Amino acid sequence: MNNVLEDLPTRSCAIRSDKIIDLIRIFETDVQLAVCQRPVNTVIHQWLDRHAADLGIGLRQSIQPGEQPDLSRLPTGAGRDALAEDIQFLADIFFELLDPPAQGFRLEIVHKAMCPRFHVDRVGLRMLCTYRGAGTEWVEESQIDRAYLGALSGGQPDELSGLLLPGHQVETIEPYAVALLKGTLWQGNEGRGIVHRSPPVTAEQSPRVLVAFDAAWLD
């Protein structure tokens, strides 16, 4: 595998790599999405498939550097242990990048799209990783008209509202990839932020399992 799978043209708002260190490029002004692609963890993958019907409703926790999450609500097994280790690994990356005083994560167990419309998060920076089901969908900046985002769509579906320009391509973040998504609250990023949405969840893929990390900035 090449070190850089795809370094999109400068007009792009996204970069993709297979090196964790390249996530630091999210600090570049024009980069709104940084993705580090990773191989599927078969231990986690098989455990999630085996326990798909009894994963519960998810959880929310705060986490400190070097701390493992408490996944005791989930079925036991090597897959749960591997998932806890991976969440700790991702949390530590987020701490290294932002150095926040605290952060929290959400382990989402979902049976339908959480945010089915294209939108921009009202956050500074969010980290996502999908462990089961399809990954988050996004659209290149040059292929959208922000005048039709959210309520400005007039209630029309994204495909009909005018948000998506002719010839657009909806991209998907691969499962197990680490993704950093800039929102509108990133310094100097008002009116920008990566335009993305949750994918539909098919019966075969249900539930979709993903983790989201957000920094907590104290006053």
Image (spheres, helix red, strand yellow):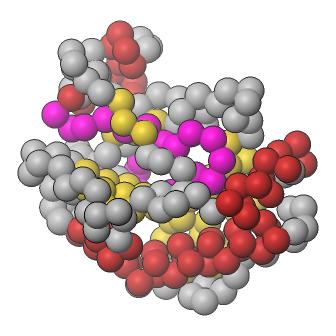
Quarter of the image with the C terminus in it: bottom left
Q: Is residue 134 above or below residue 5?
A: above
User: Along the horizontal axis of the image, is 107 left or right of 199?
Assistant: right
Q: Residue 140 lies in magenta, yes or no?
A: yes
Residue 127 visible to the viewer: no
Give the vertical position of 82 relative to 14 (above or below): below
Q: Quadrant of the N terminus?
A: bottom left
Q: Is residue 61 left or right of residue 26?
A: right
Please indicate whether residue 26 sits to the left or right of residue 199 in the image: left
Q: Quadrant of residue 84?
A: bottom right
Looking at this view, is 57 or 4 the one in front? 4
The percent position of residue 164, horizontal first and vertical second, equals 28, 21
Question: Does residue 103 sit above or below 44 in this rendering?
Answer: below
Q: Residue at x 86, y 50 (%)?
A: 51
Query: Which residues are the magenta region?
Result: 121-142
Residue for point 63% across, 41% down: 133
Based on the picture, tell me whether residue 6 belongs to the magenta stretch.
no
Q: Quick one: 40 or 67, which is closer to the camera?
A: 40
Q: Where does the image place residue 148, in percent across and percent down from the top left?
A: 29, 22
